[in-house]
Amino acid sequence: MSSLPPRRDLVHYLIVLALAGAVGSGVALFITSRHNATQTPPTANFMNAEADTAHTDGTSGQPGDSKTAPPTPSTSDEPPPMLAGNMPAPQAALTLGNWYFDHQNWKKAIEKYEAAIKLGIDNADIRTDLGSAYRFSGNAQKALEEYQRAHKEDPKHENSLFNQGAVYVLMLNQPQKGVDVWKQYIKEFPHGQSVENARKLIDHAEKEFNLKK
């Protein structure tokens, strides 16, 4: 039986697990889609801060549909020729963006989401999915910009606010800002879908990084 990793590594792992799957139009987290497949190792059972996720086209996934870390994409994968069919150009771009997101091809997902936005589909859901694609591709600043823009466009959009905490804690090394975001989330959405997740993440981050309460 293997021993547990050092506390800092374990906390970081748990935060990654909880935050990896937050995408756009989730009504139910961290945030709502079949974008990511379930992988929940036993060591994280005591902190299952996941929730289900959903595509910007409205299709939903199952609770816990998230990954600890997106795999390296296979850039050779291409969608079926008839996937977008005779859809109008904006919807076709969105559909293809979702397909590339599902297949962890972040570069092409970003290209298609940005094309859809330019063609007129611009809302908090697609901006949040775009932000997540940027986050998974390692572009923290662009991810944060898209999440912030999404929440500005729709202040009632939970996921776009919640996901900002992941960028601050895991990518920008600003845990206090991440905690502040999650506290803001709880304040704005006291009955939100990820309130318990936020509380657990706040508690772990404050203990791990010796933050003010």
Image (cartoon, grey):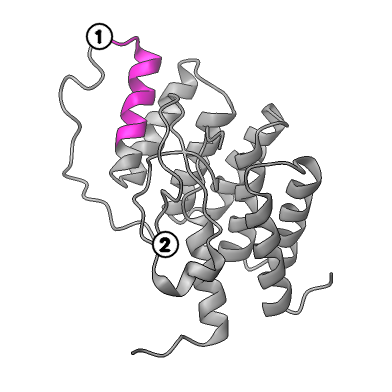
- Marks 2 and 1, how far apart at CA: 36 Å
Q: In this picture, is 22 found above or below 55?
A: below
Q: In terms of secondary structure, where does tag 1 sit?
A: loop
Residue 91: within the magenta?
yes
How many marks the image carries: the answer is: 2
Q: Amino acid at mark 1?
A: Asn
Q: Position of residue 87 (x, y in %)?
A: 30, 11
Q: Amino acid at mark 2?
A: Thr
Q: Considering the image in quadrants, where does the N terminus appear?
A: bottom left
Circle 2 or circle 1, nearest the eye: 2
Q: In this picture, is 82 found above or below 160?
A: above
Judge the density around disc 2: few (<14), some (14-19), many (≥20) Cα neighbours within 10 Å: many
| 191 or 13: nearer the viewer | 191
The residue pinned by badge 1 equals 86
Q: Residue at x 79, y 41 (%)?
A: 188
Residue range in magenta is: 86-99
Q: Residue at x 71, y 32 (%)?
A: 152
| 112 or 160: nearer the viewer | 160
Q: Are marks 2 and 1 in contact (CB under 8 Å)?
A: no
Magenta highlight: main SS: helix
The answer to whether residue 95 is left or right of residue 46 is: left
| 80 or 45: nearer the viewer | 45
Residue 207: within the magenta?
no
Q: In this picture, is 49 found above or below 34?
A: below
Q: Considering the image in quadrants, where does the C terminus appear?
A: bottom right
Q: In terms of secondary structure, where does tag 2 sit?
A: loop
Q: Position of residue 102 (x, y in %)?
A: 32, 41
Q: Position of residue 170 (x, y in %)?
A: 57, 65
Q: Which mark is residue 68?
A: 2
